[in-house]
Image (spheres, helix red, strand yellow):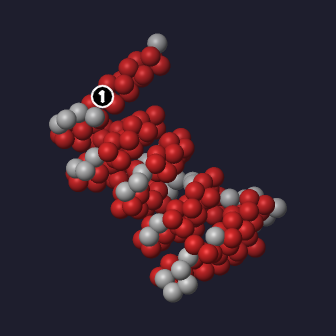
Amino acid sequence: MAERETDRQNRQLIRQLFSAHDDVVLSVIKEIRYSGNPALISAVMKLYSQTDAPAITHAIVALIRDLKSQAAVDSLITALQDISDQDKKQAIVAACWQSGLDFSAYIQVFLQLFLEGDYMTALEAFTVIENALPFLQDKKVLKQHIVYFKEQSHRIKPASDKASLYHEMIKVLEENLQMTGE
């Protein structure tokens, strides 16, 4: 019975989240931010990718930054990969590392974001990866990430700002490989 009530409340919040009235939307985002309900992250991220309202986008980034539920990570990563706007993507990547959640299962995604994004997105992805590495204890997986990343070197222009960041990322990955147990 309580589960049905929760589902009903979630559906109501999602309807309000897509209201035409910004004050209603901001109120719902605030409520989700304080409740930390991971079941609503997909809907929040859908709104984020669709809206141009600065107050709403800032409120959503703040919500992601304040997330403390590891259960929200899967939905967040799925939605992050669907964001096409580079500035919006960068803001969410930054919010990921600011949240302090464990993204070690998604290092490959952040390596990809590093390679595909502009310098600032790469810098934010670097920080997420650096923060996630202590949680990654599987040396084999880390080796696979290093091999993948090195194989992608052709995607980095040698004289670009990203080139030095790319080499630093390899250094950080390899140092963590030496510190990781079997």
Q: The disc labelled 1 sits on which kind of residue?
A: Arg
Side of 171 where 41 appears, left or right: left
In the foreground, 13 or 179: 13
Residue 72 lies, with reference to residue 116, above or below; the image says above
Q: Dot 1, how many residues are within 10 Å of its Cα: few (below 14), some (14-19), or many (20+)? A: few
Side of 13 where 138 appears, left or right: right
Residue 66 in the image: state x and y as whole percent. 40, 51
Residue 179 lies, with reference to residue 22, above or below; the image says below
The answer to whether one can see residue 101 in this image is yes
Seen at 76% across and 73% down, the residue is 178
The answer to whether one can see residue 95 in this image is no
Quarter of the figure with the C terminus? bottom right
Residue 1 in the image: state x and y as whole percent. 46, 12
SS of the residue under disc 1: helix
Q: Quadrant of residue 135?
A: bottom right
Side of 52 where 135 appears, left or right: right
Residue 170 in the image: state x and y as whole percent. 64, 75
Seen at 35% across and 38% down, the residue is 32
Seen at 75% across and 66% down, the residue is 143
**Residue found at the far right of this picture:** 182
**Residue found at the far bottom of this picture:** 159
Q: How many marks?
A: 1
Q: Which residue is mark 1?
A: 15
Q: Quadrant of residue 19?
A: top left
Seen at 69% across and 65% down, the residue is 148
Residue 30 in the image: state x and y as whole percent. 29, 42
Residue 92 lies, with reference to residue 152, above or below; the image says above
Residue 164 lies, with reference to residue 117, above or below; the image says below
In the foreground, 68 or 88: 88
